[in-house]
Amino acid sequence: MSQTIDIIEQITEESGAYGFAVRLSQPLKLEIGKFAQVSLPKGLYFYGGSAFGPGGLKARLGRHIRPKSKLHWHIDHVTSAGNMVAAGVVENSSECKIISAASAMPGALIPLPGFGSSDCRNCASHLVKLRRISDISKIFEAVEAAQRWRFA
């Protein structure tokens, strides 16, 4: 938990986009809206989002990183069931750029079309299933992430 707090303190308050990777060690059965009765297989997932409101990237990414008492967004169900692997931020950018880089990784899959992207007209989903942990660094390099972190 102290590593989580240390990372949150380092995140910029600027606006922009963020991405993070979560590992599910077992399948996750979702019970939310149009994703009710859908399962995500175990594996490595990468999510992209944006933060243009109060508190910027620190507020939004910090919320995703912290343990949750209330599940609000679709991705909360994944982060609550899995282990955070890595996170990064790109100031003054869009989550579509990050998801495009994630989707371009060899063997990347869109497990749930529309997941986390209900207000996006460009992306099939803001959740991508990755094959290799090394893809995370490649994604952050491709989008020139200003900050990035690995979790123990």
Image (cartoon, grey):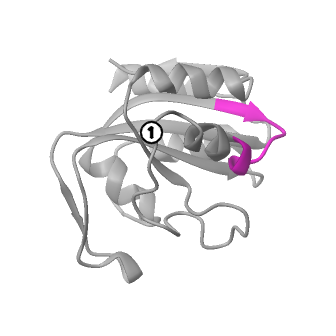
| Residue 6 seen | no
Q: Residue at x 39, y 82 (%)?
A: 33
- Residue bounds of the magenta highlight: 89-97
92 in the magenta segment: yes
Q: Residue at x 63, y 25 (%)?
A: 140
**In this picture, residue 96 sits left or right of residue 21:** right
| Residue 53 seen | yes
Q: Please provide percent x and percent y for residue 86.
A: 46, 27
- Pick the residue in front: 145 or 100: 100
- Pick the residue in front: 20 or 134: 134
Location of residue 34 with respect to 109 vertically, above or below: below
Q: Residues within 10 Å of mark 1 (few under 14, many from 20)?
A: many
Figure quadrant of the N terminus: top left
Location of residue 76 with respect to 20 vertically, above or below: below
Figure quadrant of the C terminus: top left
Q: Label 1 amino acid?
A: Ile
**In this picture, residue 150 sits left or right of residue 23:** right
29 in the magenta segment: no
Q: What residue is pinned by disc 1? A: 65
**In this picture, residue 4 sits left or right of residue 24:** right
Q: Please provide percent x and percent y for residue 21.
A: 44, 36
Q: Please provide percent x and percent y for residue 66.
A: 41, 41
- Pick the residue in front: 53 or 75: 75
Location of residue 94 with respect to 38 vertically, above or below: above
Location of residue 139 with respect to 18 vertically, above or below: above
Q: Please provide percent x and percent y for residue 100.
A: 66, 45
Q: Residue at x 44, y 49 (%)?
A: 109
